[in-house]
């Protein structure tokens, strides 16, 4: 895989990371959680349930997606809904694990004096649960969620909030994420170096009009792009 689209070779003092599907595979965890819900119901289809979360009717993590699916199946009851939601959340959290090399890479970045922040559209409660479960939370000086910044990506507010917290200028910072639209585009708009986590991009189509400076086949490639010598 091609490594760059022409990296700008700027000194990197801070790295802002998207969370889901950049640090760990949330989509895989969601699919497993949907499978377990269907197993409990004894009816339905896991992929169809997963697609409920992508409709844009409710949020990507909103339990009302499960309620709508139960209603479509004709099996909605308050007790059933409660068990399905609990099963979904428990399995999703239990299944989430950091991608290979993520923890070691964050440690190398931190040891090099690079400021680290998470910039995510997940709610604060969900973000801290997942970062805690994966053992990554202590590597980040700041975690910016929509409750903190007041806006969701691709608006740049969360990125700006993280940069202020790290006392970093955009031209000295890198944005790492699995979405060209929600991570790379706002990073480029602010003048940051951008690294596309291609390994975590589960979307079927990529917009041809948005290019990242760096394309990562693995998170562990990051140190080489911020000037940290290889081991």
Image (tube, helix red, strand yellow):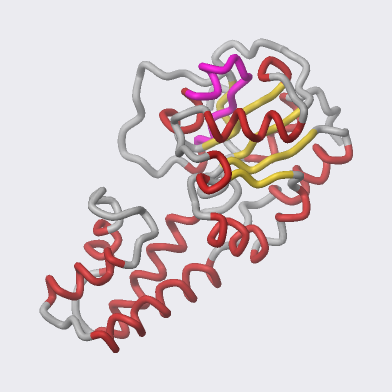
- Give, as a single range, the part of the protein colored magenta: 186-198
Image x and y of residue 76, in percent? 18, 81
42 is higher (above) or lower (below) than 18 = below
Q: Is residue 142 magenta?
A: no
Compared with 181, 55 (above or below) is below
Q: Is 174 located above or below residue 171 in the figure?
A: below
Q: Nearer the viewer, residue 223 or 160?
A: 160
Name the residue rendered at 26%, 48% in the picture: 56
Horizontal side, residue 47 vs residue 22: left or right:
left
On screen, 167 above or below 28? above
Q: Is residue 77 left or right of residue 129?
A: left
Where residue 189 sits in the image (x, y, percent)?
51, 16
| Side of 183 where 43 appears, left or right | left
In the rendered image, residue 61, in percent from the top left (x then y), is placed at: 39, 59
* Residue 190 is one of the magenta-drawn residues: yes
Furthest toward the bottom, the residue is: 79
Total tally of numbered discs in the picture: 0
* Residue ID at (20%, 67%): 68
Tell me which corner region of the image, top left, top right, bottom left or bottom right, holds residue 13: top right
Residue 115 is drawn in which quadrant? Answer: top right
Quadrant in which the C terminus is drawn: top right
- Look at 76% across and 44% down and name the residue there: 141
x 50%, y 31%: residue = 183
Place of residue 71 in the rendered image (x, y in percent of width and height, measured from the top left): 15, 74
Q: Nearer the viewer, residue 166 or 51?
A: 166
């Amino acid at each position: 895989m091609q490594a760059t689209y022409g990296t700008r070779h700027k000194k990197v003092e801070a790295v802002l990371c998207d969370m889901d599907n950049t640090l760990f595979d949330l989509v895989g965890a969601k699919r497993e959680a949907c499978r377990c819900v269907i197993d409990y119901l004894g009816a339905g289809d896991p992929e169809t349930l997963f697609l409920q979360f992508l409709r844009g009717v409710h949020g990507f993590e909103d339990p009302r997606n499960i309620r709508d699916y139960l209603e479509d199946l004709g099996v909605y009851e308050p007790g059933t809904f409660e068990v399905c939601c609990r099963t979904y959340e428990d399995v999703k959290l239990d299944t989430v694990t950091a991608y290979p090399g993520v923890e070691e890479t964050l440690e190398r970045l931190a040891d090099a004096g690079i400021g680290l922040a998470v910039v995510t559209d997940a709610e604060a409660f969900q973000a801290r649960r997942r970062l805690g479960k994966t053992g990554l939370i202590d590597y980040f000086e700041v975690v910016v969620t929509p409750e903190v910044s007041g806006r969701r990506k691709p608006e740049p507010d969360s990125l700006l909030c993280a940069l202020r917290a790290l006392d970093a200028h955009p031209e000295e910072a890198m944005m790492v994420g699995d979405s060209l639209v929600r991570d790379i585009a706002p990073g480029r708009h602010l003048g940051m170096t951008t690294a596309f986590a291609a390994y975590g991009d589960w979307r079927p189509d990529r917009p041809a009009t948005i290019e990242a400076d760096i394309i990562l086949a693995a998170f562990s490639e990051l140190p080489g792009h911020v000037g940290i010598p290889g081991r």
